[in-house]
Image (spheres, helix red, strand yellow):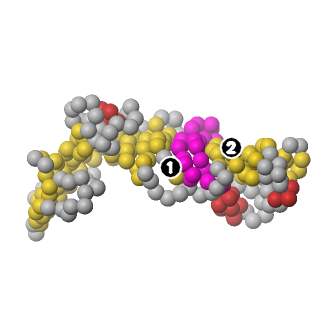
């Protein structure tokens, strides 16, 4: 998982779109300049900046002893509002939120030194939850993606329950789940079953509803099958299910049909 850009990098990218943009900043009632460290050296407080000609409408940035550390509020020209904090390394740290021009929360992230950790949420323009992800050790271990009608389009589970939403979907309640996935409202893309976060079965359908691929865990073996549009088998892989972190190689058989 890549690191989030530093505040300096973000501002640089925004300003490149308008080389003539000029920030008018004020700190504790005094005029200061973001590009002239002598004007902010050793000072603390909330620096307020405006830029009516560029891409940033308003920037509120916290200074501590002359360093940009702490809460930041940035309002772009289109009304989008970003709220977050930066640490002494200049990376975003803590909870970061993005609101659209109507004031609707569109994204909520948890960050640690610029890296996503824990719960990450994305909301639709109408305000409902659209995506839920959980990051652990620089990897996304849980993903739940919703359509506007509340049905699921994507599901990826972790070995343990991480949020209330994954308990039944990922089979952490004591029995295997049975979930239908959709590519659009009323258009199924397949189905999936999890038990304690481990995939038990999966089917994948094409846009015409034809079976494309199946996967199942049976008697300790992971069996994957791929089919031609005619429904005839194209390939099959049958391997012993091992711990993903195991150093042992794959063991099983694989075959294909013309």
Distance of label 1 from label 2 (alpha carbons): 18 Å
Residue 192 at x, y = what percent? Answer: 24, 43
| Mark 2 Cα-neighbour bin, 10 Å: few <14, some 14–19, many ≥20 | some
| Mark 1 Cα-neighbour bin, 10 Å: few <14, some 14–19, many ≥20 | many
Is residue 45 found left or right of 238 in the rendered image? right
Q: Does the CB distance between marks 1 and 2 fall below 8 Å?
A: no
Spot the residue most to the bottom.
Answer: 258
Residue 26 at x, y = what percent? Answer: 84, 47
**In magenta stretch: residue 155:** no
Q: First in sequence, mark 1 or 2: give its number.
A: 2
In-front residue for pair 225/253:
253
**What span is colored magenta in the figure?**
90-114
Residue 84 at x, y = what percent? Answer: 63, 44
Residue 256 at x, y = what percent? Answer: 11, 66
Assign a secondary structure to mark 2: strand
Taking the spot 20% from the left edge, 54% from the top edge, the residue there is 242
In-front residue for pair 239/150:
239
């Amino acid at each position: 998982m890549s690191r989030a850009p530093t505040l300096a990098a973000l501002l640089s990218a925004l300003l490149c779109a308008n080389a003539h943009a000029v920030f008018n900043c004020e700190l504790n009632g005094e005029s200061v300049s973001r590009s002239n460290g002598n004007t902010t050296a050793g000072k603390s407080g909330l620096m307020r900046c405006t830029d009516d000609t560029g891409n940033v409408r308003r920037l509120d940035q916290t200074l501590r002893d002359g360093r940009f550390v702490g809460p930041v509020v940035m309002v772009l020209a289109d009304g989008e509002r970003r709220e977050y904090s930066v640490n002494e390394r200049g990376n975003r740290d803590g909870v970061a939120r993005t609101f659209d021009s109507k004031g609707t929360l569109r994204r909520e992230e948890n960050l640690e030194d610029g890296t996503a950790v824990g719960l990450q949420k994305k909301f639709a323009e109408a305000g409902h939850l659209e995506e839920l992800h959980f990051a652990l050790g620089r990897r996304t271990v849980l993903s739940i993606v919703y359509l506007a009608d509340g049905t699921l389009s994507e599901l990826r589970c972790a070995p343990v329950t991480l949020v209330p939403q994954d308990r039944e979907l990922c089979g952490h309640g004591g029995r295997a789940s049975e979930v239908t996935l959709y590519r659009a409202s009323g258009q199924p893309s397949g189905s999936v079953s999890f038990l304690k976060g481990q995939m038990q079965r999966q089917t994948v359908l094409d846009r015409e509803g034809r079976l494309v691929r199946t996967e199942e865990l049976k008697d300790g073996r992971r069996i994957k099958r791929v089919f031609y549009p005619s429904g005839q088998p194209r390939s099959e892989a049958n391997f012993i299910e091992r711990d993903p972190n195991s150093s042992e190689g794959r063991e099983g058989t694989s075959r294909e049909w013309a």
